[in-house]
Amino acid sequence: MISLEFLLASAIGLLTSTGVYLILRARTFPVVLGLAVIGYAVNLFLFATGRIHVNAPAILTETLKITDPLPQALVLTAIVIGFATTAFVIQLALRSRYESGTDHVDAKEDVQLQYDPREDEP
């Protein structure tokens, strides 16, 4: 039988490797998606630091199995911050697409030079 810790560690590793693969793509949408996936992997890692117990209370009682509530609170906060950050980065990517005309991350050659310094010469 597969243990819960092994399953969680495999999920964290899979999410991290998927996120790194997507970040290394040359387009903006996969990069944003990769950042979100890595954020999910970090959230799972934080959640796993609070001890994985099934049907364990998050408050100190007389039982021997307890779950730390601090990582759960951190993950809830990280979900909200990650959602806001993802929305902001998507807005930046859309503005970059509008300004440059391409969605490549390294669009140095594709961007037209809008300012010509020779025009300022007398």
Image (cartoon, rainbow, N blue to C red):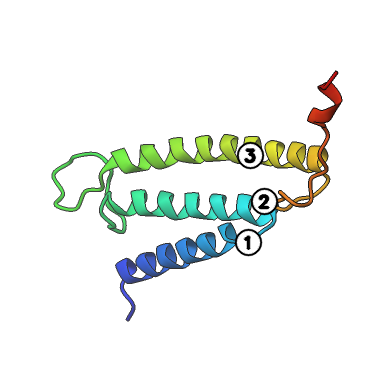
Q: Which mark is residue 25?
A: 1
Q: Which residue is mark 2?
A: 105
Q: Is residue 7 above or below residue 79?
A: below
Q: How far is mark 2 from mark 1, CA to CA?
A: 8 Å
Left or right of 43? Residue 28 is right
Residue drawn at point x = 27 percent, y = 46 percent: 57
Q: Residues within 10 Å of mark 1 (few under 14, many from 20)?
A: some
Q: How far is mark 2 from mark 3, CA to CA?
A: 13 Å
Q: Which residue is mark 3?
A: 89
Question: Is mark 2 in CB contact (under 8 Å) with mark 1?
Answer: yes
Residue 62's spot in the image, x, y percent?
13, 44
Q: Amino acid at mark 3?
A: Val
Q: Earlier in the sequence, mark 2 or mark 3?
A: 3
| Frontmost residue, 36 versus 115 | 115
Residue 114's spot in the image, x, y percent?
83, 34
| Frontmost residue, 36 versus 44 | 36
